[in-house]
Amino acid sequence: MVCRFFSLFVFFWSCLVLSAQQDAYRQYIDTYKTMAVDQMMRYRIPASIKLAQGLLESNAGRSTLATMANNHFGIKTGGGWNGPYVLRDDDAPNERFRKYKNPAESFEDHSLFLSKRGRYSNLFHLHPHDYKGWAYGLKAAGYATNPQYAEILIGIIERYGLHEFDRVKYSRLSHGRQAEAMGRRLYLCNDLVYLIAEKGDSFSSLAKDFKIREKRLRKYNEVDKYYELAEGDVVYLKKKKRHVAKAIRNTLHTIQPGESMYGIAQRYGIRLAYLYKWNLLPEDYTATSGDRLLLR
């Protein structure tokens, strides 16, 4: 009898773990699907492969590398990398992994990593929908040491239907037609479309380009009528949310030097007031390097 109840407990526990994993995977896909399609359009890397690698390498955005260094693809510092890095044990102790400002930078660098290295060049001659060819090609070129790497990627792609994104037209995405006409890149965070401000951008010009009233666009991004955009600012095209993406709820964000509460709220696509509320912070609190913030 004890063995029977124990077996049932193990069965139900396994179901719960599997359900949580599936939820995390779906949230990751919803968060980064636009980014993956954008990269596919510019670099000819199938969006299905980009998403599958991101899911696998970052554990759906929950790995230490993803949460602390925005590194979603496990890329190390080789190849002339001069940027910041973090130390993690991998094939050897204390290996150096690239650290990025945001996930968008990680997705972009992954594309450059593949497209500028000769050992991956044959992959770019494959049909854009040949995700199986890409999966086996990545393994053959030495992207990962796991002998089942290709099969794992293919399994993820087919289980979650990621190959459908390989056929997506960019103009079908929210605001995609306007962005495509202007040569602008759109990204997705917390299921919200955003762009990165470029030199010369203003709320007025972006509002006109995307057919949104300037007052509303400023409200979406929680700035007053006097705030002027700076190059590199995140600009959301819809109202930010009350909660972070499910995959990172109830995790902690460690404030880095130079970060502000507003910048952190923009990073996660959440309204600033809720960041204060979750952490029981007074209105006059300013971000302090090393402090940890609960994300909900």
Image (tube, rainbow, N blue to C red):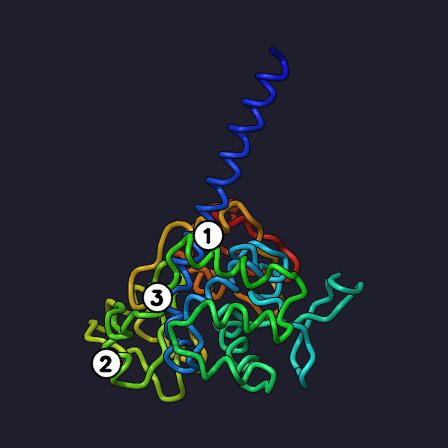
Q: Residues within 10 Å of mark 1 (few under 14, many from 20)?
A: many
Residue 15, given in percent of the width and then of the height, sits at 49, 34
Q: In this orientation, does residue 254 appear?
A: yes
Q: Nearer the viewer, residue 231 or 155?
A: 155
Residue 53 lies, with reference to residue 24, above or below; the image says below
Q: Which amino acid does label 2 sit on?
A: Asp
Q: Nearer the viewer, residue 233 or 179?
A: 179
Give the quarter of the image for residue 39: bottom left
Residue identified by numbered label 1: 25
Q: Which residue is drawn at 51% across and 61% down?
A: 153
Q: Which of 3 and 130 is in front in this view?
A: 130
Q: Residue 93 carries which label?
A: none
CA gap between label 3 and label 2 equals 26 Å
Instruction: State which tag comes first along the sequence, 3 or 2.
Output: 3
Q: How crowded is mark 3: few (under 14 residues within 10 Å), some or many (20 or more)?
A: some
Residue 252, given in percent of the width and then of the height, sits at 58, 51
Instruction: State which tag comes first along the sequence, 3 or 1.
Output: 1
Q: What residue type is labelled 1?
A: Tyr
Task: Name the residue furthest top.
Answer: 1
Q: Which residue is drawn at 40% across and 54% down?
A: 160
Residue identified by numbered label 3: 165
SS under mark 2: helix
Q: Residues within 10 Å of mark 2 (few under 14, many from 20)?
A: some
Instruction: Report the side of 158 relative to 137 (left or right).
Output: left
CA gap between label 2 and label 1 equals 33 Å
Residue identified by numbered label 2: 209
Q: Which amino acid does label 3 sit on?
A: Phe
Residue 206, given in percent of the width and then of the height, sits at 28, 79
SS under mark 1: helix
SS under mark 3: helix
